[in-house]
Image (tube, rainbow, N blue to C red):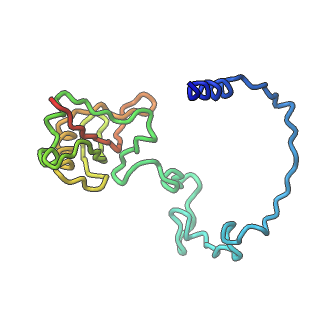
Amino acid sequence: MLVHAAAYSVYHIVMTPRAAVSSEDIKLQDVEVDFEDFPPELIGGTTRPAPVEKQEWVEGASKTAEDALEEEINLSALSGDGTDKDGYLFSFNGDRPPTPIINFDLRAFFPREAKEANITRKTVVLLIQVEADGTLKSAKLLSERAGYGFDEAALKIVHMARFAPGYVKGRPTRMVHKLPITFVLEEW
């Protein structure tokens, strides 16, 4: 009974509405910061970075050629355009990632070796490349090897699945995506 009373008291204290504070009631004060108190290593050290000559960092420039014209420099290529080496857009840059369409029983793919070792749950992460029409171009293991047949089963599942493509601004786009596959042993 005492425990219930204590729990209700705590709940009542926490849930009681507090008085609202207006932003006009808050007074801001200037604060001085002395940067000498910070170790120099945290704010860039005591030396200046080495000077970099222009031809070392401008795209298309060399010591013997003139610099590229401003309109010739591809700023996306300089800073990265959000794609992998094959030109597939990373799914976190899109509006919707590629989605697997599974129309078969996944329980049949739980590895026998894992059942014999009494493993009931395991997650395998794959890196997949999906074309704009939804076809799977490639799949490879991204997580550490799980063993017990999980890796092979995950690859088999992803190759049997169909895919809805990823979308950017309402248009299907070829994407690379991290796809976790979780195996759970259930009694049939």
**Residue 45 position (above or below residue 120):** below
Task: Give x and y (percent) for residue 151.
Answer: 21, 49
Quadrant the N terminus occupies: top right
Residue at 33% x, 51% y is 86
The foreground one among 86 and 155 is 155
Instruction: Say which of 42 and 94 sits in front.
Output: 42
Q: Position of residue 187 (x, y in %)?
A: 17, 31
Pick whichever, 67 or 79, lies toward us. Answer: 79
Number of marks drawn: 0
Q: Which residue is located at x 52 percent, y 62 percent?
A: 59
Res. 96 visible in picture: yes
* Left/right of residue 70 with respect to residue 177 in the rendered view: right
Q: Is residue 176 visible?
A: no
Q: Position of residue 22 (x, y in %)?
A: 82, 28
Q: Residue at x 56, y 66 (%)?
A: 57
Q: Residue 145: x percent and y percent?
A: 25, 55
Q: Which quadrant of the figure contains the C terminus?
A: top left
112 or 27, nearer to the observer: 112
Which residue is at the far front?
Answer: 1
Q: Residue at point 17% right, 40% down? A: 110
Q: Does residue 75 lie above or below 66 as drawn?
A: above
Residue 92 image-quadrant placement: top left
